[in-house]
Image: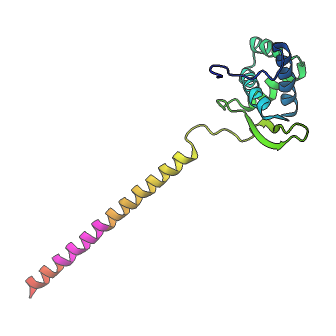
Amino acid sequence: MRHAKAHRKFSRTPAHRKAMFRNMVTELFRREKIETTVHKAKDLRSVAERLITTGKVDNVHRRRKAYGFIQDKTIVHKLFAEIGPRFKERPGGYTRITRTRTRVGDAAEMAVIQFVDEAFKAGKSKKKVKKKSATKSAAAKTKVKAKEASEVVEVKEEKVASEKTEEAKS
């Protein structure tokens, strides 16, 4: 059983695996979209999102942490100048994995990992807003019905009062 074993080994030594993810995250930051196997994309996502979170705040300590993993100076600059500020308001979930095809040679499932482009809207989700608006419209309908009912009662009271005055006159 694989209890408490979070990551895959990919039949590589730890040094080879680290080098592979360094290269993959560097290319992801350079091109903002790469195609790889589904399992590599899933493991790459955690590495990339951790670095993007580091890139949100630009200071010496965080730059040095980034240089410890990414060894290309231009990519580190891009991380802190473009990628980090782009996701400043987003609390995570910076990448998207989309399955694309099956590779011909070994029938491996392929996927594209890319940055999420939609702007993050802080606050309530669309579903809650719809439910809330539906509730508001139901409440508004209830108020309208109550208002109409009170108007009907007022009209009936006026009719009764006018009939009584007519009877009193005659």
Place of residue 70 in the rendered image (x, y in percent of width and height, measured from the top left): 84, 18
Q: Residue at x 28, y 71 (%)?
A: 152
Residue at 89 percent across and 22 percent down: it is 74
| Magenta span of residues | 149-161
Is residue 130 left or right of 43 when viewed as pictured? left
Q: Quadrant of the C terminus?
A: bottom left
Viewer-side residue, 51 vs 150: 51
Numbered disc total: 0
Image spot of residue 147 (x, y percent)? 33, 63
- In the shown orientation, is residue 56 left or right of residue 110? left
Asked which quadrant contains residue 7, the reply is: top right
Which residue is depicted at the point 74% across and 25% down? 52
For the N terminus, the image quarter is top right
Q: Say which of 131 and 98 sits in front.
A: 98
Q: Could you say which is closer to the camera, residue 147 or residue 165?
A: 147
Of residue 127 and residue 10, the one placed in the foreground of this image is 10
Magenta stretch contains residue 154: yes
Q: Position of residue 114 (x, y in %)?
A: 79, 36
In this view, the residue farthest toward the bottom is 170
The structure residue drawn at horizontal position 36% and vertical position 60%, both measured from the top left corner, is: 142
Name the dominant secondary structure of the magenta segment.
Answer: helix
Q: How is the image coloured?
A: rainbow
The percent position of residue 76, horizontal first and vertical second, equals 84, 21
The answer to which image quadrant residue 8 occupies is: top right
Q: Is residue 158 visible?
A: yes
140 in magenta? no
